[in-house]
Amino acid sequence: MQKQEYTITVYTENQVGLLNRIAIMFSRRKINIESLNTSPSEIDGIHRFTIVVNETEDVLRKLVRQIEKQVDILKAEFSTNEEVIYQELALYKVPTPVIAEKAKVERLLREYGARAVVIRMDYTVFETSGHREEINKLLAALEPYGLMEFVRSGRVAIIKASTGFHDKLKEFEQRERSEEVAENEYLGQQEKVFTM
């Protein structure tokens, strides 16, 4: 199987140390995390991790099952780039005198859909969002003008075919509790079960 880029989406309770436990699962399997974003989700008290990796589907399937076994994990799934709508955010710091002199830079920024978020005498900060390739193209175009600083966020993604985890959680909460008590079939049979 060939490696390709996948987006892993994990819904979780916001617990201390969870990110570390998830990261350890990746490092044990020697899987590099290309991008990681964590934020509140559409459900109050539930957080969403968006993790981008380059791996085979088989390895990823096993990893996602392992992640989902963690106590604080509510749901974990993976998607190809074609199955998600995604964006990244980038900030570029460029010397203001260069920008002021070169009308070419203004055209360049319009072409890439960038906008100024801070304009000072010594530097100007531009912001844009898009796919990594688009962000990298603007980065390469701004480098000749004395790019002072650059930062890109992790991926944010929404699964195209999904109705969202929110509906599944609501459905689970609305299920009526059974009046029947499930009995443990091994109760009272310690000698039979635990003999060697």
Image (tube, rainbow, N blue to C red):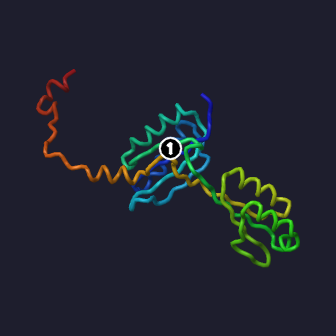
Relative depth, front residue between 50 and 79 = 79
Q: Quadrant of the N terminus?
A: top right
Q: Residue at x 59, y 36 (%)?
A: 55
Mark 1: which amino acid?
A: Ile
Single out the residue that lies furthest toward the top: 196
Single out the residue that lies furthest toward the bottom: 121
Determine whether 83 is above or below 57 in the image: below
Q: Residue at x 41, y 51 (%)?
A: 165
Single out the residue that lies furthest toward the left: 188
Q: Position of residue 110 (x, y in %)?
A: 76, 65
Q: Position of residue 188 (x, y in %)?
A: 11, 32
Residue at which label 1 appears:
24
Q: Position of residue 96 (x, y in %)?
A: 81, 73
Circle 1 sits in a helix, a strand or a loop, which is it?
Answer: helix
Relative depth, front residue between 33 and 91 = 91
Q: Position of residue 144 (x, y in %)?
A: 86, 60
Determine whether 43 is above or below 176 in the image: below
Q: Residue at x 75, y 66 (%)?
A: 93
